[in-house]
Amino acid sequence: MRFLIDLVIACVIVTSILSIHFVAWKHYKSFRHPTNIVLVEHESWHTNWQDAFEQGKEENKWIVLMFTAEWCPPCKRMKQEILPHNDIETILSSYISSFVDVDNENNNTVKNKYLDSKQGIPQFVIINPYSRKIYNRTVGYQSVAKFSRFLQGKK
């Protein structure tokens, strides 16, 4: 009789464990990790930094470069969550903006000149289009408030 009671208790325990694992697995599969974020289109952002510098001179606007990479979760989060924010878009309208893919060999010139490789990405650099000197730099994922202060620090 004791054997039967122990067997029933073991079955209840195993069933409970399996149920917990099933629920946990179901929630795990629905979890959206930052690397799975679908990027928002940024129509005002250049993908060619040379064009951004030319347009900056033509329109007398400073340049914002975002050094980024496909494999970079904080870069994707910035593109998804912060750049589309109304306050940020309004401030960025006074700049010419360009994404710079750090893995693209065509960007080696701008990368070697403006990217501080010791600090990582995403990295944002504000540049004067005439002197091509760096005015300001920030690194990493930024809140809307912090990124806004960075952008407004130029003025």
Image (cartoon, rainbow, N blue to C red):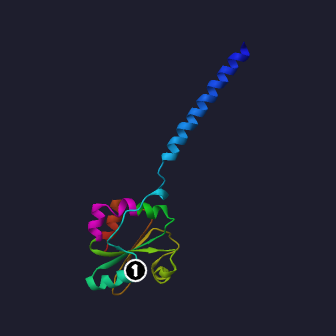
Question: Magenta stretch containing residue 91, yes or no?
Answer: yes
> Overall secondary structure of the magenta stretch?
helix
Q: Which residues are magenta?
A: 79-92
Q: Say which quarter of the image contains residue 135.
A: bottom left
Compare residues 11 and 62 and report the one nearer the observer.
Answer: 11
Residue 67: x and y in percent read 45, 72
Q: Is residue 14 left or right of residue 64?
A: right
Figure disc tally: 1
Residue bearing mark 1: 49
Q: Quadrant of the N terminus?
A: top right
Observer able to see residue 70: yes
| Residue found farthest to the bottom | 131
Residue 95 magenta-highlighted:
no
Give coordinates of residue 129: x percent, y percent. 34, 84
Determine crowd level at label 1: few under 14, some 14-19, many 20+ residues with C-alpha closer than 10 A: many
Q: Is residue 121 above or below residue 60?
A: above
Amino acid bearing label 1: Trp
Q: Residue furthest top?
A: 1
Q: Residue at x 30, y 70 (%)?
A: 92
- The picture places residue 130, in percent across and down from the top left corner, at 33, 87
Residue 15, image x, y percentages = 61, 29
Q: Left or right? Give the position of 9 relative to 112.
A: right
Q: Is residue 155 visible?
A: no
